[in-house]
Structure formats: C-alpha cells, structure tokens
Image (cartoon, rainbow, N blue to C red):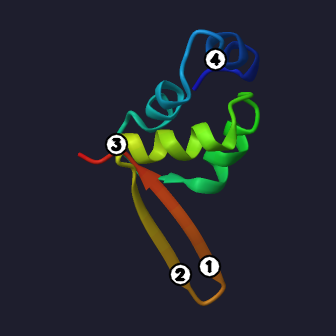
Amino acid sequence: MLPLSEKKTENKNMSCEDWLANQLKDGEWHLVDWIRTEFKKTGFKKSEFKAARKNLGVETFHQQEDDINNWFWRLKK
C-alpha cells in the first residue's frame, strides 16, 4: 500500500473505479471498514464509490458470530 501522501497525489490522475480496483487487486478479502476509512481520504464522492463497486462487480462476505459483525469485499475472480 502507498503512504497516504502518495495516495492523494496519485488520486488526481486516477478514477474512483481505478482506486478501488487497486485496493482489491490481490483478490483477497478486505475488511470494508478499512476500505471506507481509506476512501474518505481520497476526495472522491460517495456516489462515485458506490458506482465503482457496482461496475467492478465487487463480491461481499458477511461475518457474523456472537458479537462479531464484519463485512469484507474482494474483486470477483
């Protein structure tokens, strides 16, 4: 992952869809809370973020056990 200062500079030449694809490019499951935290630092609009997720066909996984309630995303394989 890039340091935050580099991400902001890089985002000027990157679409929201490109940014999200870059975050999920390894094909592994990623905690949505972390992705959203990083997204808030990008300057993209929430509507762009939702559209990017839809356009990329992001898969979701919901982990719910006792007091654990997490959502994960990954790019479809």
Q: Are discs 2 and 1 less than 8 Å apart at CB?
A: yes
Q: Quadrant of the C terminus?
A: top left
Q: On the picture, is 30 further left or further right than 26?
A: right
Residue holding disc 2: 64
- Pick out the residue farthest to the bottom: 66
Answer with mark 3 or mark 2, whichever residue precedes in sequence: 3
Q: Quadrant of the N terminus?
A: top right
Residue holding disc 1: 68
How many other residues sit within 10 Å of disc 3, few (<14), some (14-19) or many (≥20)?
few
Residue holding disc 3: 27
How many other residues sit within 10 Å of disc 2, few (<14), some (14-19) or many (≥20)?
few
Three-letter amino acid code of the residue under disc 1: Ile
Position of residue 51 measured from the top left corner of the image (x, y, whole percent): 50, 42
How many other residues sit within 10 Å of disc 4, few (<14), some (14-19) or many (≥20)?
some
Residue in the foreground of this view, choosing between 63 and 59: 59
How many other residues sit within 10 Å of disc 1, few (<14), some (14-19) or many (≥20)?
few
Q: Mark 2 and mark 1: span between their CA atoms?
A: 5 Å
* Vertical position of residue 41 compared to residue 56: above or below: above
Answer with mark 1 or mark 4, whichever residue precedes in sequence: 4
Q: Viewer-nearest of labels 3 and 4?
A: 4
User: For numbered disc 2, what is the local secondary structure?
Assistant: strand
Answer with mark 1 or mark 3, whichever residue precedes in sequence: 3
Residue in the foreground of this view, choosing between 67 and 74: 74
Q: Mark 1 and mark 4: span between their CA atoms?
A: 33 Å
Labelled disc at residue 11: 4
Three-letter amino acid code of the residue under disc 3: Gly
> Which residue is drawn at the image coordinates 67% and 38% (left, top)?
39
Three-letter amino acid code of the residue under disc 2: Gln
Q: Are discs 3 and 4 less than 8 Å apart at CB?
A: no
